[in-house]
Image: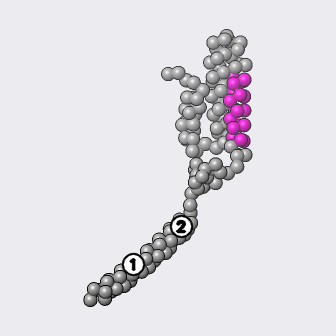
Amino acid sequence: MVLSRLNLYRLLWHAWGGEENLSKSDHVKASGIAGGVSGMVGGMFRGPKNILPGILFFSLLGAGSSFVSQRAKNNEPKQSNTKTSWLDSKWSPMRSLSDKEYVDMLEEKILRLDAEIAVIDENIASLKTSGRSKNNSTTTKTG
């Protein structure tokens, strides 16, 4: 089994109770230990006099980068719980509607359709009356 820095890091997480139970300082410690082991292995390949400098350098590099990463996570602005969508873009010709806006839009369309139906009903009524008057005029002429 190849014991890479990432695998050792995950092994330490698991040994210390899982990632959800680790504090921020535990993450930094685990990264420092994993970096030290990686530096030791690298130093062994380069010779015995390079083991200690490799351990020190990669421990500090791992712990330092983890510390900076944890600080950067703390400084990030809190994300709002609203989902971002492509509809929220200012370049999109469409936008998402709230329930109230959607209901208002539907009521407006229904009102418009009711008005059109009323106009059509008036046209039908006027055609019926004009048709009756033509029928009455033709029956009086022939009768």
Crowd around label 2: few <14 · some 14–19 · many ≥20 (10 Å)? few
Q: Which residue is mark 2?
A: 105
- Residue 66 image-quadrant placement: top right
Q: Secondary structure at mark 1?
A: helix
Magenta extent: 55-72
- Kind of residue sitting beneath label 2: Met
- Kind of residue sitting beneath label 1: Leu
- Residue 118 x %, y %: 45, 77
Residue at point 43%, 74% (across, down)? 120
- Residue 37 x %, y %: 63, 24
Q: Which residue is mark 1?
A: 127
Residue 58 is a magenta residue: yes
Q: Is residue 62 left or right of residue 134?
A: right
- Give the farthest residue toward the top: 47
Tell me the chief SS of the magenta region: helix
Which mark is drawn over residue 96?
none
Asked if one can make out residue 132 in the rendered structure from this viewpoint, the answer is no
**Quadrant holding the C terminus:** bottom left
